[in-house]
Image (cartoon, rainbow, N blue to C red):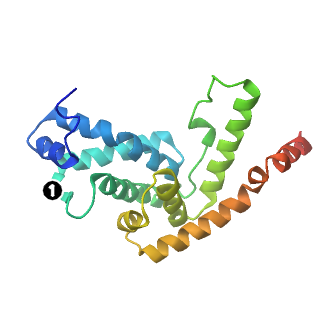
Amino acid sequence: MNDLDDATDECLLERTRRGDATAFQKLYDRHRDTTFRFACLLLGSSEHAEDVTHDCFLGLIRNPGRFDPRRAALRTYLYAAARNLVLKRLRRPGNESPYGNPRNQESPDRSKEPLQSLLDREMVDDVRKALAQLPHPQREAIVLFEYEEQSLADIAAITGAPVSTIKWRLHQARESLRRELAPYLNGGAEKRQEKSNHA
């Protein structure tokens, strides 16, 4: 086992500041996937999420002093950095609507039967579309809470909003998703009927 496997993020970052490339690689391996997934769920584009993830870690190398372990965990800091980069992208002209083509995000699980794989894929696409319809503050709250399993306090720290606001955003997001995904929540019969009517 590598001696860096049990090292804290703070220790790895300190070694990174001194030019230890192996320590940085360990930090990257430890936090890359969660940062990417968060950005991808907010942007709806794996390509743009890769750019955001890259820029997050580049910023960490260039300005390691911005991270203060007394204020937040490194993962919380990276979520906040990714969030800021996502918001910058969404403010660019032509980037108001995320999830341009949700079918490009993920390959189907080929270990499943073709019909089950297709149905699962359809549900994943519909969940992504439902997420895309949420206002950005609600989308980031639900992604951080449900997908990234962050606490309300951590989400408040990441977004700069009070916990009471985060609770309200989560409530609104859940209500919207419940309406959009009602066919699946009702056992799928309604959704299958709807699809057969359009066939």
In the displayed structure image, the side of residue 162 where residue 76 appears, left or right: left
Residue placed most toward the observer, 154 or 137: 154
Quadrant position of the N terminus in the picture? top left
Q: Position of residue 120 (x, y in %)?
A: 69, 37
Q: Where residue 170 sits in the image (x, y, percent)? A: 55, 67
Which element type, helix, strand or loop, lies under badge 1?
Answer: helix
Residue positioned 62% across, 63% down in the render: 174
Tell me which corner region of the image, top left, top right, bottom left or bottom right, holds residue 66.
Answer: bottom left
| Above or below for 23 versus 136 | above
Q: Quadrant of residue 83?
A: bottom left
Please identify the residue farthest to the left as the structure is shown. 18
Determine whether, in the image, residue 195 is placed left or right of residue 50.
Answer: right
Residue 145 vs residue 16: left or right? right
Quickly name the residue at label 1: 65
Residue in view at x 50 percent, y 53 percent: 42
Residue 38 or 63: which is nearer the viewer?
38
Any part of residue 173 in sight: yes
Q: Is residue 173 above or below residue 146?
A: below
Mark 1, other Cα within 10 Å: few <14 / some 14–19 / many ≥20: few
How many numbered circles are shown?
1
Q: Position of residue 41 (x, y in %)?
A: 51, 49
Q: Return the x and y of residue 54 as percentages of the image width and height.
A: 33, 42
Q: Is residue 93 visible?
A: no
Quarter of the image holding residue 17? top left
What residue do we see at 17% from left, 51% from top?
A: 64
Where the C terminus falls, by quadrant? top right
Q: Amino acid at mark 1?
A: Gly
